Image (tube, rainbow, N blue to C red):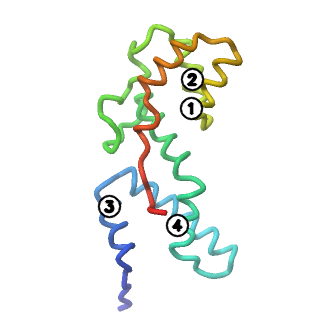
Amino acid sequence: MIMQVMSSDEKKRTRSSSESQLFRLALNEAEKHKWIESQKAGRDLGDAALRDWSRKYWWRWCRDRWIEHLSGERFWSELDQHDFGLLQRDFHPNTYLIQQITMKIKAGGENLDIIQWAHTSKQDIAQVLQILKLLDINSRRLTFWPN
């Protein structure tokens, strides 16, 4: 029988991932990345490959899960339960603008990107700011791996 010894970081990661479906799935994605990159390198890249996935893909991967949650497609317990299905509710009267902003967020846009787009396309900045405040992108950020 082969016994595998886990580092303290691996133990922490395993414990937190077992408590969280979102983090467990993210770790699965990071492990896939580790396998692919290790195959390319011809050796096991270990935690460095997991950190690489975190740096390159975590924010976008997490943003996609947040949009699923907002859209009511999938409930993620790690995210605010009151946000679930928010995009299906009448939380702001300008549904066209909500759709446009949501598309920009899905494409990776941040608040400043959306404000610049709104200014360039002559959108009602006050409404854009209201919607961005209601969505509150910045407070929805989760940390996957310490840098």
Query: How many angstroms separate mark 4 from mark 3 (CA)?
Result: 15 Å
Where's residue 32, x and y in %? Answer: 55, 64
Earlier along the polypeptide chain: callout 3 or callout 2?
A: 3
Contact check, label 1 and label 3, Cβ < 8 Å: no
Residue where numbered disc 1 is placed: 105
Earlier along the polypeptide chain: callout 1 or callout 4?
A: 4
Residue where numbered disc 2 is placed: 101
> Image quadrant for the N terminus?
bottom left
Secondary structure beneath dot 2 equals helix
Secondary structure beneath dot 3 equals helix
Query: How many angstroms separate mark 3 from mark 2 (CA)?
Result: 32 Å
Residue where numbered disc 3 is placed: 16
Q: Amino acid at mark 4?
A: Leu
Where's residue 19, x and y in %? Answer: 28, 57
Earlier along the polypeptide chain: callout 4 or callout 3?
A: 3
Contact check, label 4 and label 2, Cβ < 8 Å: no
Contact check, label 2 and label 1, Cβ < 8 Å: yes
Asked if residue 74 is positioned above or below residue 24 in the image, the reply reads: above
Can you tell which quarter of the image residue 43 is in?
bottom right
Residue found 62% across the figure and 12% down from its top: 123
Residue found 39% across the figure and 12% down from its top: 90
Secondary structure beneath dot 1 equals helix
Q: Amino acid at mark 2?
A: Ile
Query: How many angstroms separate mark 1 from mark 4 (CA)?
Result: 25 Å
Q: Amino acid at mark 1?
A: Ile
Residue where numbered disc 4 is placed: 50
Q: Amino acid at mark 3?
A: Ser
